[in-house]
Image: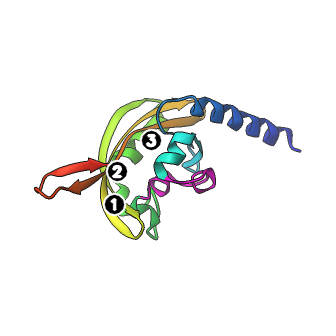
Amino acid sequence: MDQTYASSQNNIENHKAFLNALDHPTLLMQAQPRQVVTANKKACELFGKGLSQIEGHRGGQVFDCVHAFTEAGCGLDVNCENCKIKNAVVDTFSTGNSHNSIQTLLDIKKNNLISPYEMQVSTEKIGDFAIITIEKYTKKVESAWGRTELTR
């Protein structure tokens, strides 16, 4: 077995243990290509996905953003140009700056239905990776009285 590969795999296992100790759903991303390396159990539960449906995918694919599945793809679609989450992640990788409580509204496709979800994330660079902490991932619904309510 290649020693670099074995070291890399051991490093990812250490990251998984660290992520699973955190209180919030968290993704570990690499810069190139900008994809999720791994996620904690809370992120798997929040998105209703196993690690195989998260690892190696772009953030928008993990979130089920409708723009992540266009021909151009997550982060490259014209609708992604002003995505606050994508821009915070890119800035974290390029400058090392953390971003706290970045809020946005994404159109999420689940069970063939598209619904607006409020998202809030924070980013932090750790070595060659960025940690994306999901603070809010909440479906917006209209109540019978015409007020917007939030559900998970």
Residue at 26 percent across and 53 percent down: it is 140
On screen, residue 146 above or below 24: below
On screen, residue 110 above or below 100: below
Residue at 57 percent across and 28 percent down: it is 21
Q: Please indicate, yes or no, whether residue 27 appears anywhere in the rendered image.
A: no
- Identified by mark 2, the residue type is Cys
- Identified by mark 3, the residue type is Val
Residue at 34 percent across and 34 percent down: it is 101
Q: Secondary structure at mark 1?
A: helix
Q: Position of residue 35 (x, y in %)?
A: 56, 50
Asked if labels 1 and 2 touch by Cβ distance under 8 angstroms, the answer is yes
Disc 2: CA contacts within 10 A as few (<14), some (14-19) or many (>=20): some
- Identified by mark 1, the residue type is Asn
Q: Earlier in the sequence, mark 3 or mark 1?
A: 1
Residue marked by disc 1: 79
Q: Secondary structure at mark 3?
A: helix
Using the image as rendered, state which of residue 26 and residue 85 is in the foreground: 26
Q: How is the image coloured?
A: rainbow
Q: Position of residue 144 (x, y in %)?
A: 14, 58
Q: Please indicate, yes or no, whether residue 149 appears anywhere in the rendered image.
A: yes
What is the span of residues highlighted in magenta in the rendered image? 48-64
Q: Position of residue 130 (x, y in %)?
A: 53, 36
Residue marked by disc 3: 89
Q: Mark number for residue 83?
A: 2
Task: Kindly report the distance in space between the C-alpha atoms of the residues bearing marks 2 and 1.
Answer: 7 Å
Q: Mark number for residue 98?
A: none
Disc 3: CA contacts within 10 A as few (<14), some (14-19) or many (>=20): many
Q: Earlier in the sequence, mark 2 or mark 3?
A: 2
Q: Is residue 119 left or right of residue 23?
A: left
Q: Position of residue 122 (x, y in %)?
A: 41, 34
